[in-house]
Amino acid sequence: MKQRLLVMNGQKIVQSEQAGAWINQKVDKAGALNPGIYNLYMAQVADKKQTHAGVIVHADNNQVYQKVGKSFVMHARTDFDKVPEIGSAKSISYNAQGKATVAAEAPKLTRGRSR
């Protein structure tokens, strides 16, 4: 089933495609998510040999979706002891048993000016 997430005006709308039309499934508060359209159906299955760093955008009964760069990665919800908070930037890696290890994402160094 194709799913996407719309975030606008402080609302998070989960939609699924049925017979060529997008149907609203659930409406929630957006929290810390940035406004935009998140095409969750384009998510790739997480490679357990890599570390994935990015913002957690959605979690359902089976998957946890993370935006990594401009693409999306989906992690199996059963791999987590506790699902990360939606809207938080996390770094997810896997241990030898295949369980997810969640850490805060390292802050990106930026060059800025202050007055």
Image: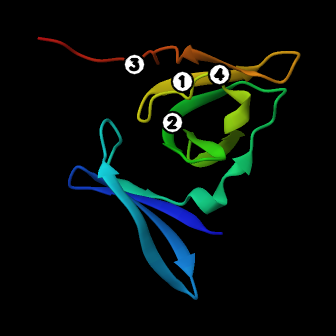
The residue tagged with tag 4: helix, strand or loop?
loop
Kind of residue indicated by mark 4: Asp
Q: What is the spatial separation of the Cα atoms under label 1 and label 2, in whole angstroms?
A: 7 Å
Question: First in sequence: mark 4 or mark 1?
Answer: 4
Kind of residue indicated by mark 3: Thr
- Location of mark 2 (residue): 56
Tell me if label 4 and label 1 are in contact, CB under 8 Å.
no
Q: Position of residue 92 (x, y in %)?
A: 65, 24
Residue 81, disc: 4
- Location of mark 1 (residue): 90
The residue tagged with tag 3: helix, strand or loop?
loop
Kind of residue indicated by mark 2: Ile
Q: Residues within 10 Å of mark 1 (few under 14, many from 20)?
A: many
Would residue 35 be found to the left or right of residue 48 on screen?
A: left
Kind of residue indicated by mark 1: Lys
Q: What is the spatial separation of the Cα atoms under label 2 and label 4, in whole angstroms?
A: 15 Å
In the rendered image, the vertical position of residue 55 relative to residue 7, given as above or below: above
Residue 110, disc: 3
